[in-house]
Amino acid sequence: MRNATMVFAVVFAAAGCAPPAVRERVVLLPAPDGSVGELIVQSDRKNIVLNARYAGAEVVGDKLQERTYTEQEVKQRFADAMGALPQRVRAYLFYFDYDSMAPTRESFGVIDEVRDELTRRPGAEVIVIGHTDRVGTGPYNDQLSLKRAESVRDILVKAGIPTERIETFGRGEREPLVETPDETPEPRNRRVEIKLR
């Protein structure tokens, strides 16, 4: 499967979602930005590559058939199933100055967005993940990334988000946004990600 992060497939079996002749149906849904990945549907005799918005494959009897839906058809036919899909993960970023545990002043603009989104998603988990650039030792950066995550957690708590809803993690320099050689300062890697899921 190519571009797995962009693939959203929904499989509907005959139990109440499809006419009796259709045993199984797969529809490729676009990501929020409209892009799609690629999904291969296989049977004993045939392969179908789905790589376009609302491309589909159906098993009718013992035959695999290709089908393309319109957006309107998908919304009407699969409204209940799509309503049961989990909400997409929302992510927000705080950036930090070199060797600092305090977010940059510009980063504070996302606090209201996070609080508003949590009001709309009362059951959402709040995951706060700290990161560093590649300057410094691995153990030092692990500690610094966790301290950054904890400082953002404290900011969220002051903004009214209950502590028990927030989990914090430090990933050090292991997951950079921008790949750099060791000991290279990179402001975009000095960050905390807030993920609501």
Image (cartoon, rainbow, N blue to C red):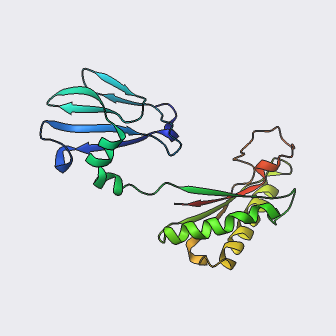
In this rendering, would 3 be left or right of 106? left
What residue sits 37% from the left and 36% below the top? 54
Q: Position of residue 1 (x, y in %)?
A: 46, 31
Residue 194, by quadrant, is bottom right
Residue that extends furthest to the front in the rendered view of this protein? 72
Q: Where is residue 51 in the image (x, y as percent from the top left)?
A: 43, 29
How many numbered badges does the structure rendering display?
0
Q: In this view, does 75 lie above or below 51?
A: below
In this rendering, would 97 be left or right of 129? right
What residue sits 58% from the left and 69% below the top? 116
Judging depth in this view, the residue of 85 and 113 nearest the camera is: 113
Q: Position of residue 122 (x, y in %)?
A: 48, 72
Residue 41, by quadrant, is top left
What residue sits 17% from the left and 31% below the top? 60
Residue 64 showing in the rendered view: yes
Residue 167 showing in the rendered view: no
Q: In this view, does 185 lie above or below 157?
A: above
In this rendering, would 44 be left or right of 128? left
Q: Where is residue 171 in the image (x, y as percent from the top left)?
A: 69, 55
What residue sits 22% from the left and 44% below the top? 13
